[in-house]
Amino acid sequence: MENRTDKNSYTILFAIGMVLVVGALLAFAASFLKPNIDENKRLEKQQNILYAMGVNENDESNANFVSTADAPELFKKYIEKQLVIQGADVVEDKEAYLIDVKKEQTNAKAGKERKLPLFVGKKDDKTFYIAPIRGKGLWDAIWAYVAMDKNMVVQGVFFDHKGETAGLGANINKRFFMDDFIGEDLKNNGTFKGIDVAKGNADPLNKDKSDNEVDAIAGATITGNGVSAMLKSELKLYVPYFETLKN
Amino acid sequence: MGLLSKKDAQLITDPLADNNPITIQVLGICSALAITAELKASLVMAISVLFVLGLGNVVISLMRNIIPSKIRIIVQLIVVAALVIIVDLVLKAFAYELSKTLSVFVGLIITNCIIMGRFEAFALGNGPWKSFLDGIGNAVGYGVILIIVGFFRELFGSGTLFGIPVLGDPIAKTGLYAIGYENNGFMIMPPMALIVVGIIIWIQRTKNKALIED
């Protein structure tokens, strides 16, 4: 006799039932947990921005953020202004850090003028200009918060990625890589040049801060190229604003 | 073992050595190559698979009498995908830091052939308790190999363990590096994982001749 579960009608009903149950379960889980997830992402942005301007809990070799509990307060304390640059217009916006860079990049492709968020922080009488940028790594998105002084010399940087290879490209968020950028000049003789993540450069200890190069990570060529391309194309957009700071 | 009958205990102990999913059945090789460049990622992947395989085996076992045989593979895939998505969401909501470390691995679990293999070969034909033990045993057997491979690759490839330098500083030339030791960059490339797995298989078969096929 044919087994009950071998019938086509049963199979189809089972499939429909399964899809409904699993779909409902996942939709419920996703919407139930969404507020928590969004809050975590918001705090992470604050931690990242603070990290770039040197407000962090780094120990000798590891990158550590300030705690999520302290992040909102420290963010208020150190970030003096949040700017949105759109063409020649610069306006203050207290929630500029929530601007979705990815969405803005898509808008720019569609011909709309892009909103560029820039955070102005002050620590020990030093002013930091922190730009959130986004690009492509080997597998997926990479992004960064770059803190600069008014001459576009990097003061600190935080890189992160969605899915680069563990132990290779994923190391862009490690200190041995990020710290190399500190002090590097994004300009060369006054014109914007970016910073290249270079293989086989002559300066592995990174003593030359005006060569527009940092040492690459072995085995992470494409992620490194992505970092160079991201810095070049995204920070270039901020150059007109930095020109206005000279006066 | 007082808690488990001898047969039940075997479900856990067999996959650890003589029926290891990686070294004997040669399953789950893709993830063993991809993520073992560092020890921490190996450990995290091992724990994630332990969770998904243990729970997934129970779910499939409970459903084993109502799953239509024609679409059983798809049903298994949906169960593992749903479990993985829920794990991912819960981690993002309550352990955000950890979820970032896991990132791609969580998604990779879905494609791990050990999981589908155990669903198909064991959970469909056995009760929930036995399936649970089988899942745990296989996940631990898989995890042990991952951790061994991760240990050697990170140690010889980067000179660190869990990201902590153990052989000195390669740039400042301290520790072992002072006497001319160099990290082997080849160790962090995927081909070297295959060679390390091969060496483990070799050692295991030298010790237990019964495992050698003609």
Image (spheres, coloured by chain):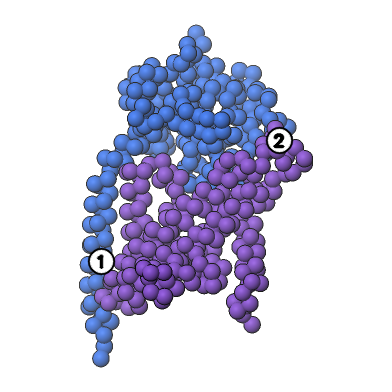
Chain colours: A blue, B purple
Q: Position of residue B19 (x, y in %)?
A: 52, 72
User: With respect to residue B110, does A206 lie above or below?
Assistant: above
Residue A122 is situated, as x and y percent measured from the top left of the image, at 44, 16
Front-most of residues B199 and A204: B199
The quadrant of the rendering that contains the N terminus of chain A is: bottom left
Q: Nearer the viewer, residue A232 or B154?
A: B154
Residue B150 visible in image: yes
Q: In the image, A104: left or right of B163?
A: left
Q: Which of B22 and A173 is in front in this view?
A: B22
Q: Mark 2 sits on what residue?
A: B174
Q: On residue B198, which mark appears? A: none
Q: How crowded is mark 2: few (under 14 residues within 10 Å), some or many (20 or more)?
A: few
| Mark 1 → mark 2, Cα distance in angstroms | 60 Å
Q: Do the residues labelled 1 and 2 touch (CB within 8 Å)?
A: no
Q: Residue farthest to the top?
A: A247
Residue shown at 65%/34% (left/top)? A215
Q: What element carries label 1?
A: helix
State which chain disc 1 sits on.
A
B135 or A237: nearer the viewer: B135
User: Residue placed farthest to the right in the image?
Assistant: B179
Residue B112: x percent and y percent? Answer: 46, 63
Q: What residue type is labelled 1?
A: Met
**For residue B6, which quarter of the picture?**
bottom left
| B58 lies left or right of B193 | left
Q: Which residue lies furthest to the front in this view?
A: B2
Left or right: residue B155 versus residue A53 is right
Residue at label 1?
A18
Residue at 66 percent across and 72 percent down: it is: B206
Q: Mark 2, chain letter?
A: B
- Amino acid under label 2? Thr
Q: Residue A143: x percent and y percent?
A: 47, 36
